[in-house]
Amino acid sequence: MGVRNTRCARATAVATVAALLTAALVPCASAKSGSKNRVETGASTVELVWPLPPDQPRIRYLGTLTGESDYQKNESRFRRFLLGRRTEPGVSLHKPYGVTTDSAGRIYVSDTGLGTIVVFDETARQVNVLTDEGGVRLVTPIGMAIDRDDRLFVADADLNQVFCIGPDGQLLMSIGASEKLQNPTGVAIDQARGRLYVVDSHLHKLFIYDLAGRLLETWGSRGSIAGTFNFPTNIALDPSGNVYVVDTGNFRVQVFDPDGKLLIAFGEAGDGSGSFHRPKGIALDSDQNIYVVDAAFNNFQIFDREGQLLLFVG
């Protein structure tokens, strides 16, 4: 699986990724802001922050990624004079799902509509996509995680495997065929313990492998009582190795210690603050605040480590 520049790629639909472009839970009332994080409203521009004044802002919108056009907007007139205006549309996100970053700060976005991984390189100001030259053609890439060696682990919900791809784009191994995974979605890596966590939505289980792809154990079964799952989707880890699982069909997040002991669970079905309808994405910040994206609400909610709602955005 190689990497190719997207000037040869084609995609007509445009979607947005803003999850990694939001400053999290830090006072920003005095922060200096450029035009990138401001939105025009008529004759003026406003900075998007949450909560709204007079409360102290804690979240500040930084920007949006859509595709190769993000890096063409500010081309100089001199460059256009020399090279001409680009007419090729390049790649644009179609149906983005997972987001992760590597050691160089490149942003990887799994796109189920394009059936590939789109890589945004802010430093080089270019967008690349993974190709099938390295040994596998992805169909429906979902969850992703990158280890300290910049190996990319990506779950494909249609191929029912997790693929490990090296920094050079070559396929290193595939995981899950012998376990007959049915719908792998969320992926997370515990580097300290040498573990790879894979959520299988249709088997209602969490599969734990070592980083060589050998199965160590499984957690869970289908149900609604504590410690069971109903179509779980995504997963995140904290620095202590605690495991945060979005139990989508039970409208909750469950938190386990590294040995699989349930620590807390929070959330319930509803349309009010702190409730869930279609919880999907999950991430933690450096203070171990928990961010949960809800696909039905089109927002994300922020909880403290005890599961108490702090703020919702969107």
Image: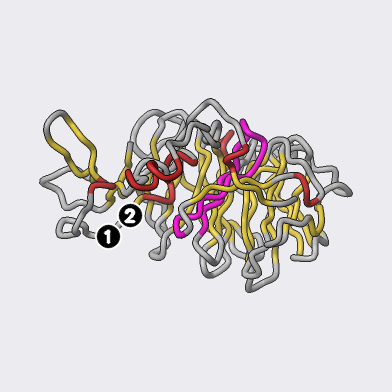
| Residue that label 2 marks | 23
User: In the drawing, does residue 188 fall left or right of residue 286?
Assistant: right
Q: Dot 2: few (<14), some (14–19), or many (≥20) neighbours within 10 Å? A: some
Percent of width and height locating residue 157? 71, 38
Callouts 2 and 1 close, C-beta under 8 Å: yes
Q: Residue at x 63, y 33 (%)?
A: 114
Q: Amino acid at mark 2?
A: Ala
| Residue that label 1 marks | 26
> What secondary structure is found at the residue carrying circle 2?
strand
In this view, the mark in front (2 or 1): 2
Query: In the image, is residue 58 part of the stretch drawn in magenta?
Result: no
Q: Amino acid at mark 1?
A: Val
Above or below 287: residue 311? above
Q: Dot 1: few (<14), some (14–19), or many (≥20) neighbours within 10 Å? A: few
Which residue is at the far right? 178
Q: Quadrant of the C terminus?
A: top left
Which residue is at the far top? 12
User: In the drawing, does residue 61 fall left or right of residue 3?
Assistant: left
Above or below 258: residue 296? above
Query: In which quadrant of the rendered view does residue 267 lie?
Result: top left
Q: Residue at x 56, y 39 (%)?
A: 97
Above or below 225: residue 126? below
Percent of width and height locating residue 231? 64, 36
The magenta stretch is 106-123
